[in-house]
Image (cartoon, rainbow, N blue to C red):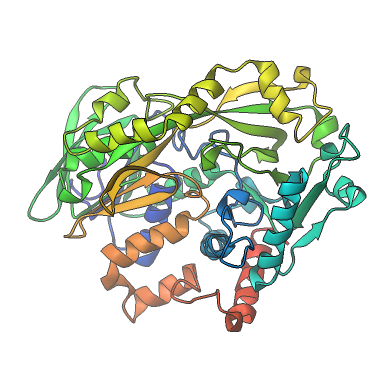
């Protein structure tokens, strides 16, 4: 038995993985009920090195403001359907509220260590795209969430917002943009790390890196979790009442190890990524925004091109991408080429085969992206920054996203771009699968886990009051027009605390 365990080997909760999901659940549960004993195990040698790492995602506080992939469809009236963007905005409000609470209560010392104000711009070129953005703005600006949004087709206005977009561009090309100043750049790795480190300092809290969970066996009281110390090669076991699998790309194999019936039929489709990064201060000083465009062809939603200001560990850079790539690994740091074939089971092989047959354009796109030349990558960048020079840019690896594949409505093999939370009937284990906009709406996702698996702690009384302090609108609907005043008040408090206003 590990003598460092504060729970004598029988914690209330075990968290697998140190990314933003596990970190958020650990911080939320410990504040909800300080008496809970919580242990976290991370297989890598450092915290939050996978999808939450600052360079493994775009760092966009996804609020539906500029992400055109969240509004791809038109409604019966021919106008762009903005319902998804409205929903994501509300979910991001929960994140801002919880992060503001974390700063006020000392879980996070300095909000600038993980979040900074950066305007969000949607930018399009060519008349069909301009028509799309105009319709999108019409629908979004009519809702109180987006009443601060500004739309323009004026080139000089766009030049003031983001000069790089106009430098060297054809003056006859139709362009348009929308902008909201209350956007953000988020270092989810820093946020997750600080949450986990705070948890480790609390009574009944423990975290360990270089420790891989290798076994999950259901018991009458919960789960027996077998852990491998990767450095000493020794194994030990814990008996927990509840287990959360928040291991990013490593979640699917662990979910399969659990053997719960709810895991049957799930498969994983890994998609790698790369960025172009620029550290030239001349350009960085001109581009203080996150600029999103429209998804090209067969690109998955996580590969929508964008030109972003990044602020990581106090240093500013420009980032463009992402460029997707084919991979069979599920994890960037500790993954293996055998991850994908090793995940094939009798219950999911039909789904995986159908994905291969019905998503040939996607597979072809991923292979093409991963093998393209620097000149080809620069050509895509020049759609945003026509005067870009490849000597100012370098290529780096981004994170790996394992898209969840499952059977739905009898149609096996659907690739789900989004997030799936899989929970067993006894409410003793939950696993998180999927990708964007996961990190940004992590608080909302974790709220659903808490409501489902720890409902007793949200009943009227101290637990409910604590949750209202953490996320004031967790049980309120902010979308109706009559909620506009309440939404503005709570949002402005959180934004002031986080330094976004």
Could one spot residue 3 in this view of the protein?
no
Q: Quadrant of residue 253?
A: top left
Q: Residue at x 30, y 71 (%)?
A: 457
Quadrant of the rendering where the C terminus is positioned: bottom right
In the rendered image, residue 184, in percent from the top left (x then y), is placed at: 66, 52
Q: Is residue 487 visible?
A: yes
The tally of labels here is: 0
Residue 323 lies in what quarter of the image?
Answer: top right
Viewed as shown, does residue 459 lie left or right of 68? Answer: left
**Residue 202 location in percent, x, y?**
38, 54
| Residue projecting furthest to the left | 220
Residue at position x 16%, y 60% in the image? 426
- In this rendering, the answer to whether 121 lies above or below 498 is above
For the residue pair 326 and 315, the one nearer the viewer reads as 326
In the displayed structure, would residue 467 be above or below residue 263? below
- Quadrant of the drawing holding the N terminus: top left
Q: Position of residue 473 (x, y in %)?
A: 50, 73
Name the residue at 49% across, 46% down. 436
Is 388 left or right of 407, judged from the image as shown?
Answer: right
């Amino acid at each position: 038995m590990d003598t460092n365990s504060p729970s004598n080997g029988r914690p209330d909760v075990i968290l697998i993985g140190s990314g933003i999901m596990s970190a958020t659940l650990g911080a939320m549960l410990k504040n909800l009920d300080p008496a809970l004993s919580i242990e976290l195990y991370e297989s890598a040698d450092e915290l939050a090195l996978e999808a939450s790492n600052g360079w493994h995602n775009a760092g966009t506080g996804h609020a539906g403001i500029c992400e055109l992939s969240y509004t791809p469809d038109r409604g019966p009236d021919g106008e762009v359907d903005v319902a998804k963007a409205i929903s994501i905005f509300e979910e991001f409000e929960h994140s801002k509220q919880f992060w503001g609470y974390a700063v006020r209560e000392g879980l996070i010392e300095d909000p600038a260590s993980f979040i900074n104000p950066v305007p969000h711009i949607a930018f399009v070129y060519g008349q069909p795209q301009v028509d799309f953005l105009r319709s999108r703005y019409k629908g979004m600006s009519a809702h109180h969430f987006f009443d601060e949004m500004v739309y323009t087709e004026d080139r000089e206005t766009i030049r003031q917002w983001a000069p790089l977009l106009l430098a060297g561009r054809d003056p006859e090309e139709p362009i348009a943009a929308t902008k909201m100043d209350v956007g953000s750049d988020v270092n989810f790795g820093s946020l997750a790390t600080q949450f986990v480190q705070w948890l480790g300092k609390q009574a009944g809290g423990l975290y360990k890196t270089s420790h891989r969970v290798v076994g999950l066996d259901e018991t009458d009281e919960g789960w027996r979790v077998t852990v491998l110390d990767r450095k000493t090669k020794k194994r030990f076991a814990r008996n927990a009442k509840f287990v959360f699998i928040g291991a990013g790309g490593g979640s699917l194999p662990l979910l399969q190890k659990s053997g719960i019936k709810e895991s049957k039929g799930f498969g994983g489709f890994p998609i790698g990524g790369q960025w172009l990064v620029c550290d030239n201060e001349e350009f960085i000083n001109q581009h203080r925004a996150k600029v999103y465009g429209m998804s090209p062809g067969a690109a998955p939603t996580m590969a929508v091109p964008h030109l972003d200001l990044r602020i990581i560990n106090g240093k500013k850079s420009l980032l463009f991408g992402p460029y997707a790539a084919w991979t069979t690994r599920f994890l960037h740091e500790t993954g293996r080429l055998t991850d994908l074939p090793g995940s094939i089971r009798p219950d999911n092989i039909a789904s995986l085969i159908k994905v291969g047959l019905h998503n040939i354009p996607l597979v072809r796109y991923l292979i093409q992206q991963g093998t393209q030349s620097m000149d080809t990558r620069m050509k895509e960048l020049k759609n945003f920054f026509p005067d870009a020079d490849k000597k100012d840019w370098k290529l780096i690896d981004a994170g790996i996203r394992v898209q969840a594949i499952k059977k739905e409505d009898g149609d096996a093999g659907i690739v789900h771009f989004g997030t799936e939370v899989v929970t067993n009937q006894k409410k003793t284990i939950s696993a998180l699968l999927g990708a964007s906009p996961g990190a940004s709406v992590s608080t909302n996702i974790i709220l659903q886990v808490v409501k489902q698996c720890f409902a007793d702690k949200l009943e009227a009384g101290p637990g409910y009051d604590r949750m209202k302090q953490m996320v004031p609108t967790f049980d309120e609907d902010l979308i109706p027009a009559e909620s506009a005043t309440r939404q503005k008040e709570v949002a402005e408090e959180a934004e002031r605390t986080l330094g976004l206003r």
